[in-house]
């Protein structure tokens, strides 16, 4: 072997969380490195070289991690037979540690032996504070920096780590198509005297808290990713138009009767739900959803043909309908010149009729 790297975890907070094995390795190995000195137990790793300067000079976190891994491998490879070095990381080496993930892949390629010692992670404290059994709930742990890709299509629950800045929290909000219907839990500095666990509304996530390097977010459940599912259906329809002879032959005219037929079947499914106020059966609800899907398919089918003709896309249809609804609800979306008093559904119907007679302009709100 051309050297050895001993990776130890410093635990989630102060030195009281260090394991005996970690303490022994820290005292035994003379060449020591810290991923960051910004940790309550870092002071116990006497004589260690911290990589905080890389965080200040690196353009991206991936570049920082690349620099850390390269320096560790170079240090362990020093001399004719290499040497033993210690690498201490916050929490547990096997939880949300990108550098350890990279070392596991690359160190063997350089003939370097790895010893990874287990440690208490902040997630162990998180489950206790949240009162959550991660196995029973099926919680996934993901990196805030990679939230857009790691959480794509996931409904939760999710524990998001590395939420150290408002920029990370803002990117998380922007990447979610179906935000949580209720608050999320923000966990900060677990195990320290100023520990904080509190509920925050999703809309306020990047405004209501002051994030730091010990901040995580627990998302119990995301709502259905509507936009993602519509895109998938639209893409599927375009593929069917290319690969299926029947779908390829259809035109707006040939599909006209299907739209009428599906609308009738939706009405029949509504009747099966029973009287207003009654509790419908699960079978009736499933049938209703299925028939709505068939009707939606007709819209998607026509949008696909329209896109092929260069007329419009599914996005154009959705946008025009959105803008039309905004225009026809000036009591919800106020605009200059509208002063009608809307208090009842009859008022709404009367105003709706007036709005339909007056086409919207480019100055819609």
Image (cartoon, rainbow, N blue to C red):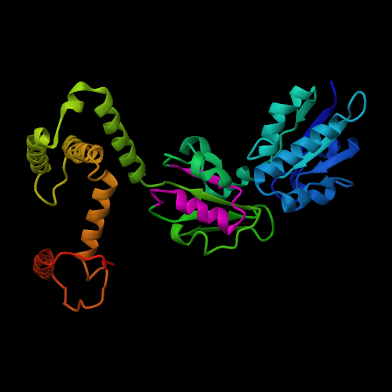
Tell me the quarter of the image containing the N terminus: top right
The x and y percentages for residue 244 are 23, 23
Residue 197, given in percent of the width and then of the height, sits at 56, 57
Q: Is residue 212 visible?
A: yes
Relative to 15, does residue 74 appear above or below in the rendering? above
In percent of width and height, residue 363 lies at: 27, 68
Indicate left or right for 138 with 214 as reference. Answer: left
Residue ID at (16%, 73%): 343
Magenta segment boundaries in residue numbering: 156-180
Q: Position of residue 200 (x, y in %)?
A: 48, 59
> Which residue lies at the image location 50% right of the left edge and 51% below the top edge?
172
Viewer-closest of 8 and 213: 213
Magenta region includes residue 362: no
**Is residue 177 covered in magenta?**
yes
Q: Residue at x 34, y 45 (%)?
A: 227
Q: Nearer the viewer, residue 85 or 249?
A: 249
């Amino acid at each position: 072997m051309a050297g050895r790297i001993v990776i130890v975890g410093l635990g989630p907070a102060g030195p009281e969380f260090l394991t005996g094995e970690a303490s022994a390795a820290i005292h035994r190995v003379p060449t020591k490195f810290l991923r960051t000195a910004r940790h309550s137990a870092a002071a116990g790793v006497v004589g260690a070289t911290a990589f905080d300067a890389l965080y200040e000079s690196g353009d991206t976190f991936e570049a920082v991690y690349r620099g850390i891994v390269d320096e560790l491998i170079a240090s362990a490879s020093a001399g004719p037979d290499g040497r033993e070095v210690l690498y201490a990381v916050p929490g547990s080496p096997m939880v949300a540690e990108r550098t350890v993930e990279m070392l596991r892949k690359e160190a063997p390629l350089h003939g370097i032996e790895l010893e990874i010692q287990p440690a208490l992670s902040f997630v162990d404290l998180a489950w206790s504070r949240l009162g959550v059994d991660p196995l029973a709930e099926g919680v996934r742990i993901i990196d805030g920096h990679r939230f857009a890709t790691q959480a794509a299509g996931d409904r939760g629950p999710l524990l998001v780590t590395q939420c150290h800045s408002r920029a990370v929290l803002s990117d998380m909000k922007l990447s979610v198509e179906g935000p949580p219907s209720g608050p999320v839990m923000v966990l900060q500095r677990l195990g320290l005297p100023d520990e904080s666990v509190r509920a925050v509304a999703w809309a306020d996530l990047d405004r209501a808290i002051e994030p730091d390097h010990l901040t995580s977010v627990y998302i119990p459940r995301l709502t259905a990713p509507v936009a993602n599912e519509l895109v998938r259906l639209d893409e599927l329809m375009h593929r069917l138009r290319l690969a299926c002879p029947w779908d390829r032959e259809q035109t707006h005219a040939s599909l006209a009767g299907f739209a009428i037929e599906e609308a009738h079947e939706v009405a029949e499914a509504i009747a099966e739900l029973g009287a207003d106020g009654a509790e419908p059966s699960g079978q009736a609800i499933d049938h209703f959803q299925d028939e709505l899907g068939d009707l939606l398919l007709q819209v998607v089918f026509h949008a696909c043909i329209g896109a092929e003709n260069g007329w419009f896309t599914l996005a154009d249809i959705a946008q025009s309908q959105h803008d039309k609804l905004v225009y026809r609800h000036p009591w919800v979306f106020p605009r200059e010149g509208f002063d009608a008093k809307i208090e009842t559904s009859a008022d709404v119907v009367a105003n709706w009729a007036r709005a339909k007679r007056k086409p919207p302009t480019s100055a819609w709100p």
